[in-house]
Image (spheres, helix red, strand yellow):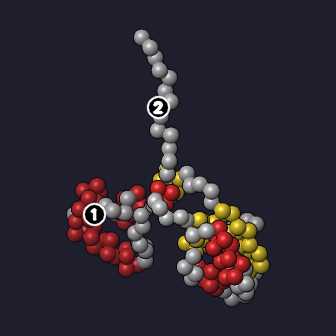
């Protein structure tokens, strides 16, 4: 039942307990209790809207930053990652495999604001050995949602 609820919420976090109960064939009481339990256990951490900021008057710059870190003896990457993700500019932080260690997603009002974050707050952190910043130019799809699609019908027209 937990996975069913989570899958419904992942697609649309605005579903009500009643709607989820109907979709899963369970009672509202079962769904409500299960959701409360998952929130207490930290399985459900929060509920977010996915916003297309390009359609608003708010200017927003997003960057993905590759961060090379020297792991610490006892804590590995965890303490450095925590120092990074505690900054309000940081929206996401992931431990990666491959050529760098962390991917940090940062948002700011301007490219210069993001640049200042990297130069003044991120790069000087002890054990950060290097960064590479990539600015997001356009979002096509985020968390399974398509932002702008070509809705024209591409089927061939048949004339009788």
Q: Give residue 102's position: percent from left, percent from top.
A: 67, 72
User: Which is closer to the viewer, label 2 or label 1?
Assistant: 2
Q: How far apart are marks 2 and 1 (CA)?
A: 34 Å
Q: Where is residue 120 in the image (x, y as percent from the top left)?
A: 69, 82
The quadrant of the picture occupied by the C terminus is top left
Furthest residue toward top? 160
Q: Which residue is rendered at x = 42% and y = 61% of the image?
A: 10
Labels 2 and 1: the sequence-earlier one: 1
The residue tagged with tag 2: helix, strand or loop?
A: loop
Viewer-closest of 10 and 50 = 50
Image disc number at residue 150: none
Circles 2, 1 touching at the beta carbon (< 8 Å): no
Packing grade of label 1 (10 A; few <14, some 14-19, many >=20) is some
For the point 26% across and 58% down, which residue is it?
19
124 shown above or below 30: below
* Circle 1 SS class: loop
Which residue is at 40% across, 69% downward?
47
Q: Is residue 45 at least partly visible in the picture?
A: yes
Q: Which residue in the structure is indicated by mark 2?
A: 153
Q: Where, quadrant-wise, is the N terminus in this rendering?
A: bottom left
Where residue 99 sits in the image (x, y, percent)?
A: 76, 66
- Asked if residue 101 shows in the view, the reply is no
Q: Which of 84 and 53 is in front in this view?
A: 53
Residue reaching furthest to the bottom: 74
Q: Quadrant of residue 136?
A: bottom right
Q: For mark 1, what is the residue? A: 16
């Amino acid at each position: 039942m937990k996975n069913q609820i989570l899958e419904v919420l992942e697609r649309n976090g605005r579903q009500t307990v009643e709607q989820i109960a109907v979709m899963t064939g369970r009672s509202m009481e079962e769904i409500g209790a299960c959701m409360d339990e998952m929130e207490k256990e930290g399985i459900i951490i929060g509920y977010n809207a996915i916003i297309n900021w390009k359609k608003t008057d708010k200017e927003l710059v997003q960057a993905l930053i590759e961060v090379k870190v020297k792991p610490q003896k006892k804590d590995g990457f965890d303490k450095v990652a925590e120092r990074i993700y505690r900054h309000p500019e940081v929206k996401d932080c992931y431990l990666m495999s491959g050529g760098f260690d962390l991917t940090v997603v940062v948002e700011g009002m301007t490219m210069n604001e993001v640049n200042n974050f990297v130069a003044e707050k991120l790069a000087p952190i002890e054990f950060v050995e290097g960064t590479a910043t990539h600015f997001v130019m356009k979002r096509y799809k985020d968390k399974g949602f398509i932002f702008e699609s070509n809705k024209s019908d591409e089927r061939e027209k048949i004339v009788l």
